[in-house]
Amino acid sequence: MTMADGATPRVRDFYNTFPYPPDPLQDGPPPGYNWRWCYATAYSHCTGRAPDPSQPLHVLDAGCGSGVSSDYLVHLNPEAQVTALDISPKALAVARERLRRSGGEQRIHFHCMSLLEAPSLGRFQLINSVGVLHHMADPATGLAALAMALADGGILHLFLYADGGRWEIHRTQHALRLLGVQADGAGVRFARQLIAQLPEHNSILQRHQQRWSLDTVGDAAFADMYLHPQETSYTLERLFRLVEGCGLRFLGFSNPRIWRLDTLLQGEALERAKALPDRQQWQLVEALNTDISHFEFFLGKLPLPSHTWSCDEDLLTATAQRNPCLWGWPGSRLLDPDLEPMDLDQEDVNLLKAIDAAPLQPLRHLLDADDGRSRMRLGEQIRALWQRRLALLRPTIH
Ligand SMILES: C[S@@+](CC[C@H](N)C(=O)[O-])C[C@H]1O[C@@H](n2cnc3c(N)ncnc32)[C@H](O)[C@@H]1O
């Protein structure tokens, strides 16, 4: 390992003891999907349009851990060459075995190295780095390396801890540090007992029971939460300062529902809030929602398009593909990309079937008769499919 962040030795030791995530290995492809790891769906989320399929696709999982995300990246992007790196040999050994058993090992290369070295591996259209930068002594330098490894027009998916919804974790970590508790099996047992013996009305105990006890049943997950040797977390303000320093553009959250004001406010408060610029609207959500424990979002390297598909002519000359991240197709009762139930009417089902049957043809081939009304109706229907993330659209001219 030629380049290392100041925290690398202790973080590597930690993950050699507790490879993460501790998900069990299984034979065959991973179940379902996570749309953030499907390049076509993620790119469409960021830009409004599907990517150009004639371009080669190189994907990097930076800090892949035990390989759960790498496995999805391989299976959700059948055309991609996937590269995965991590500083922990033990985590990488689990990742290799996971990919061998899932049948994905032919399309992935693993490297035991720091993400600081990512630019030496090439340029990538999609980089995924979930839960990694906040374990570096210098996350800004880590982010700069990922920005350098991103191809022009590429997208970077990040997940970083948020201060607001982690106060109970930070307090517990602090208490355990004061007591000299080590990140090993005995330390985990001690820490579990410490939390369990807190008085019944204690908020740390209550929050642990309500929010984290299911996630921390296994020792590796428990240690990752409470006994980590290196962890930073962010407020929105500090997050945007970090992002502004890296030269990439913020393209939006990858869990946008959390950031909707109408889940928290109504009436006049909602109206006033909606008049604020985006950043302040998010800060309002950050202030009012006490459970936000992470930020997950996309950054992009320009040039990147931005399509809103407001013009029918553009829609009808575009091509479309069904979003690969849908569960239950073909059928009218689906799970959407976020695995939420979604009902389709017969017209939507027929249109999606027609799109499936001829994904390379401009959508105007679906017109019954070439008159103004049916053009408008088809345009509306396709726009609605796109807005509901059932279909991804690609302009005919790139
Ligand atoms: C919390 S785990 C996340 C694993 C995986 N990304 C996921 O979300 O399932 C963090 C991983 O980042 C790795 N890591 C930490 N610092 C790193 C660095 N500087 N370069 C590469 N990997 C790093 C750790 O070894 C660990 O496997």
Image (cartoon, rainbow, N blue to C red):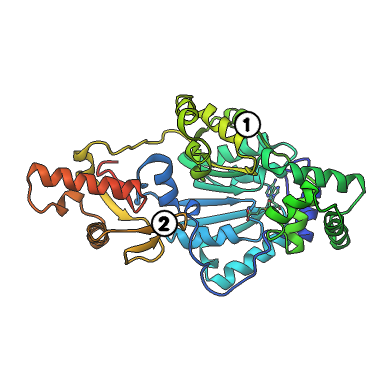
Q: Does the rendering let one see residue 193? A: yes
Q: Earlier in the sequence, mark 2 or mark 1?
A: 1
Q: Secondary structure at mark 1?
A: helix
Cα distance between the residues tagged 2 and 1: 32 Å
Q: Is mark 2 within 8 Å of ligand 1?
A: no
Tell me the mark number nearer the camera, choosing from 2 and 1: 2
Identify the image quadrant of residue 197. Answer: bottom right
- In this rendering, the answer to whether 240 lies above or below 23 is above
Q: Secondary structure at mark 2?
A: loop
Residue identifier under label 2: 336
Residue identifier under label 1: 242
Type of amino acid at the residue the image marks with label 1 = Leu
Residue plotted at (78% across, 40% down): 6
Residue plotted at (87% across, 45% down): 175
- In this rendering, the answer to whether 149 lies above or below 61 is above
Left or right: where 371 falls relative to 101? left
- In this rendering, the answer to whether 5 lies above or below 74 is above
Identify the image quadrant of residue 294. Answer: top right
Count residues near mark 1 (Cα–Cα under 10 Å), then give few for <14, some for 14-19, many for 20+: some
Q: How many marks?
A: 2
Residue plotted at (75% across, 39% down): 137
